[in-house]
Image: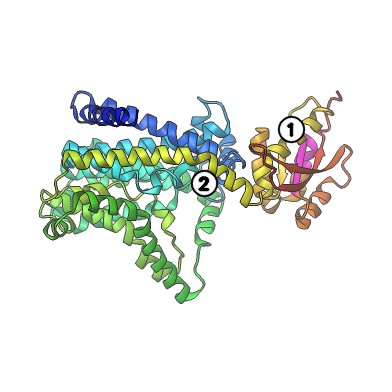
Amino acid sequence: MTSLATSRAPPLIDRWIDALLDPKRQDRTVVLSLAVYTAIWTAYRTIATWPRDVHADVSELYAWSRHLAFGTDKHPPFSAWVTRAWFSVVPVSDVTFHLLATVNIALTLYIAWRTMRRYLAPEKALFGLALLTFIPFFNFIALKYNANAVLLPLWALTIYGFLRAFEARGWLWPALAGLFAGAAMLGKYWSIVLVGALGLGALLDPRRGRFFASPAPWLMIVVGALVLAPHVAWLVAHRFPSFAYAAAHESDGFVHNLLDTLSYLAGCVGYAAVALIVWAALLRPSRAALAESAWPADPQRRLIVTIQLLMLVLPAPVALVSGIRIVPLWTMPAWTLLPIVLLSSPLITVSRDALRKVLIGAAALALAILAAAPGVAVVIHTTSHPEPFEYASLLADDIAREWQRHSTQPIGLVAGETVLAENTAYYLRTDTQSFERSDLAALKAEATARGAALVCSATDQGCLAIAEQIVAGQKQILRSKVWLSRPLFGLAGGTVQDVFFLVLPETAVPK
């Protein structure tokens, strides 16, 4: 039986490779392969995180998406816009949130592959696509959809548009590059690194005279500025709250800043280490090939190398001068050009055998991770005590049952400690406010008018004191303390203790 399976496996892989290389079938086959990749990683995320509720970054996006604006108090608004668009076509659930993250990854990989196809032979482009799946930004880390993950396709699209604009004159690609760059800035201000890398890369290129004499760079700037204009107006009107949040990431003195910056650079290498090892082990590039890859003779390839390097190292000197603390996680969207850097040299060849091995390795890794998902869930369940927000769905169930006993109206909002309130509101599909960020008098009036659930951990005395202030003098108040626990596969889980206060609306209809 084993020998039969072994004998059949290579032809199946070879048929897959043939379809991936066939000009008539390759686009469809890549899309189907990425669809399978999406399904595998969605299933992994769903199973592995079964013991816990959604991450706070996810519920925060849902809260922002309920009332769209041109800004938020933490990040620019693009990730909230995407969330709103996504849930206008699919139902809100943990699984569909996981699916949003994996579709986002697959879209990025597809854009990266299309970019590779412009500069690499088909075999090399497929090898490069598989190579990206060994970088955890294209699976594990980006499975949590947030302001970092939203940048993945936006940076990839901006880079693609910029390279097209640099190669040929015209208005379409510069306009699209400016559009996507503006959208990336609306995703997270870290995208200034992308803009800086592209601009500096163009200035360092020997063809800069022709480029800057053309309308292309100025069209990019104009379109990008138009995209950003509503957000800038919002910032001015609201006194730049997201700027204050971004500026809060400072190191504690020069020594810590230097260590943080060195840690950032080491982390960049660490995130790409497996992909680099796979590349070196399967292709065994010569010294001449390494030298030619690092500084290609072809100016377009050299521009790509420059942009890739700048996207990673440009933040380091800026951080040292400004004192801002940078972390390697923020380089998540900065890796889609790496396969072109590693593979475009004519001194590097990708054999059929090497392509087969890297595809088998990528597929085996994804399937092995999926098989390990139940074990990961058990480890999470048995070794880490849950935080209150990680059982927010259980708290929401208790709140909903108690509310429905006293009112036929929907719960107007959930308020409390920021993360617990946001997660609870997500599971109740309602609005949320934070005690830490709210005018308490206004919050009390809103709770009276609309009805509200106030939620606190039973050990959070500060939160409980604020809740007591809000409910003081209210006519229709319900208090409850709950002990919440969730079993998994028959194994008992940790217990959290929460307190909730229900403020029934003035127009509540008794049941």
Check residue 188 for magenta coloring. no
Q: Position of residue 42 (x, y in %)?
A: 47, 34
**Residue 4 as seen in the image, left or right of residue 368:** left
Above or below, comparing residue 345 to residue 16 in the picture? below
Residue 266 vertical placement versus 258 (above, below): above
For the residues bearing labels 2 and 1, Cβ distance under 8 angstroms: no
State the residue position of label 2: 234
Circle 2: element type: helix
Percent of width and height locating residue 330: 42, 54
Which color scheme does this rendered protein use?
rainbow
In this rendering, position of residue 118 left or right of residue 450: left
Q: For the residue marked with disc 1, what is the amino acid?
A: Ile
- Residue 215 visible in the shown view: no
Q: In the rendered image, which quarter is residue 224 located in?
A: top left
The question of residue 450 being in magenta is answered with yes
Q: In what quadrant of the picture does the N terminus appear?
A: top left
Q: Could you tell me which secondary element the residue under label 1 belongs to? A: loop
Whether 8 is drawn above or below 160: the answer is: above
In percent of width and height, residue 26 lies at 23, 28
Checking the image for residue 252, the label placed there is none
Q: Start and end of the magenta stretch?
A: 445-456
Q: Residue at 46%, 38% (x, y): give it.
A: 370
Q: Which residue is mark 1?
A: 411
